[in-house]
Amino acid sequence: MVSSNVATDSIETKGRGGRKKISVNRKPLTLKDREDLVFAATLDLFSGKKTQGQVLKWLRVELLSLSQDQYAKMVGVSRKALSDIESDKGKNGVELINRVFSGVGFRIALMPKDCVVLKMAVEAI
């Protein structure tokens, strides 16, 4: 498992409705920490451990330390659209998904359904 440089005590409970609020007191992530987080997210997506919405939320918080409002403004979508994607709700188009995931270094790509073919393609790179 990939460890993060983010301390668990850097999350304060002060948000709306008693939700956890992202603190500005987090330690800055190194390039290696960032790469490890993106790699872990990729593995979670490929293995089916996390949905795309769960991965987006996890990276938004752990990688960028941004609230939904901040991230939505950064990528140019509404907070509602971001919330729906993070909750795996709705039918979102390719353009919207690419816009939202571009902020954490992902984009939509076609991949073979067959895991053997996928593995062969990745190894050939």
Image (cartoon, rainbow, N blue to C red):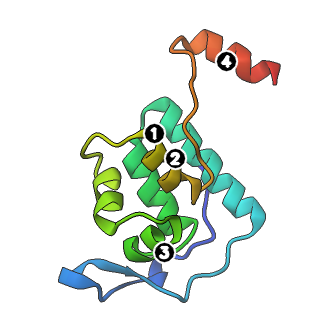
Q: CA distance from mark 1 to mark 2?
A: 6 Å
Tell whether label 4 touches label 1 (CB within 8 Å). no
Q: Which residue is mark 4?
A: 119
Q: CA distance from mark 1 to mark 3?
A: 23 Å
Tell whether label 4 touches label 3 (CB within 8 Å). no
Q: Quadrant of the C terminus?
A: top right
Q: Amino acid at mark 3?
A: Leu
Tell whether label 2 touches label 1 (CB within 8 Å). yes
Q: Earlier in the sequence, mark 3 or mark 2?
A: 3
Image quadrant of residue 16? bottom left
SS label for mark 1: helix
Q: Amino acid at mark 2?
A: Asn
Q: Which mark is residue 94?
A: 1
Q: Nearer the viewer, mark 1 or mark 4?
A: 1
Is 73 left, or right, of 110 in this rendering? left
Q: Which residue is mark 2?
A: 98
Tell whether label 3 touches label 1 (CB within 8 Å). no
Give the residue drawn at x 50%, y 15%: 113
Give the residue drawn at x 71%, y 14%: 120
SS label for mark 2: helix
Q: Which mark is residue 66?
A: 3
